[in-house]
């Protein structure tokens, strides 16, 4: 997703740069006629409105599927996670492929960082764990295997030892997904 966004941004910037370069190299010539000037202003007006409409449409289409509430209505399993220096205490360590798990995160001391890694050690979900707050993060498990929970915020001497895991089994209600 990030690489697509980068490519779109780079492409748009290239077009913009070409536009500026074109204006730079074509300006300084003889003055245009009044009719040509009017036509140019009209074109600018149309282009501005088109950009406005396109911008609003793209924002409306891409901003609403906000990831924080993903899967809110599809939770199939809940796991309470209590963080402390320096361990994770989980109310359950089993899940099945297709499960949408809601993790409820609390800490009994300092701030920690909940990081969920898939069997290939790719980060698939993360959330801050803060004193005095109960944070929730949801993840749909789409592959079986051993997932790791690591701490993502330095929280003292044995920060690196805050490791737990969740076993995700093949069998599940929605294993086809
Ligand atoms: Cu807990 Cu770092």
Image (tube, rainbow, N blue to C red):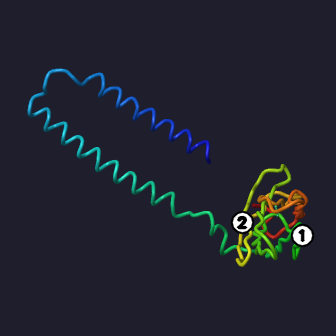
Up-down relation of residue 1 to residue 114 (above or below): above
Residue for point 91% across, 59% down: 161
Mark on residue 161? none
Up-down relation of residue 55 to residue 7 (above or below): below
Label 2 beta carbon less than 8 Å to ligand 1: no
Q: Name the residue under label 1.
A: 93
Q: In this view, does 33 lie to the left or right of 137?
A: left
Up-down relation of residue 91 to residue 156 (above or below): below
Q: In this view, does 73 lie to the left or right of 162?
A: left
Q: Is mark 2 on a helix, strand or loop?
A: strand
Rendered location of residue 135, percent (x, y): 70, 73
Count neighbours of disc 1 (C-alpha within 10 A) and say few if under 14, some if 14 to 19, many if 20 or more. Answer: some
Q: Tell which circle, 2 or 1, labels the residue nearer the N-terminal end.
A: 1
Q: Which of 160 and 28 is in front in this view?
A: 160
Q: Which of 63 and 76 is in front in this view?
A: 63
> Which quadrant of the structure image shows residue 41?
top left
Q: Are marks 2 and 1 in contact (CB under 8 Å)?
A: no
How many discs mark residues in the rendered view?
2
Q: Is mark 1 on a helix, strand or loop?
A: loop
> Which quadrant of the structure image shows residue 12?
top left
Q: Is residue 131 left or right of residue 35?
A: right
Residue for point 35% across, 31% down: 19
Rendered location of residue 137, percent (x, y): 71, 69
Rendered location of residue 24, percent (x, y): 30, 26
Count neighbours of disc 2 (C-alpha within 10 A) and say few if under 14, some if 14 to 19, many if 20 or more. Answer: many
> Which quadrant of the structure image shows residue 172?
bottom right
Q: How far, Cα to Cα, is label 2 from label 1?
A: 20 Å
Q: Name the residue under label 2.
A: 128
Instruction: Single out the mark in the foreground, 2 or 1.
Output: 2
């Amino acid at each position: 997703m990030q690489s697509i966004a980068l490519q779109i941004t780079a492409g748009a910037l290239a077009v913009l740069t070409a536009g500026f370069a074109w204006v730079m190299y074509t300006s300084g010539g003889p003055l245009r006629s009044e009719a040509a000037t009017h036509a140019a202003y009209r074109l600018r007006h149309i282009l501005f409105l088109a950009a406005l409409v396109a911008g609003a449409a793209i924002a409306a289409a891409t901003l609403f599927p906000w990831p924080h509430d993903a899967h809110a209505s599809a939770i199939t399993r809940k796991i309470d996670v209590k963080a402390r220096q320096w361990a994770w205490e989980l109310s359950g360590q089993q899940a099945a492929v297709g499960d949408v798990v809601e993790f409820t995160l609390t800490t009994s001391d300092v701030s920690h960082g909940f990081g969920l890694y898939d069997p290939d050690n790719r980060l698939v979900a993360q959330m801050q764990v803060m004193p005095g707050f109960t944070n929730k993060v949801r993840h749909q498990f789409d592959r079986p295997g051993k997932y790791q929970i690591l701490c993502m915020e330095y929280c003292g001497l044995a920060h690196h030892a805050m490791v737990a895991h969740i076993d995700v089994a093949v069998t599940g209600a929605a294993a086809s997904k």
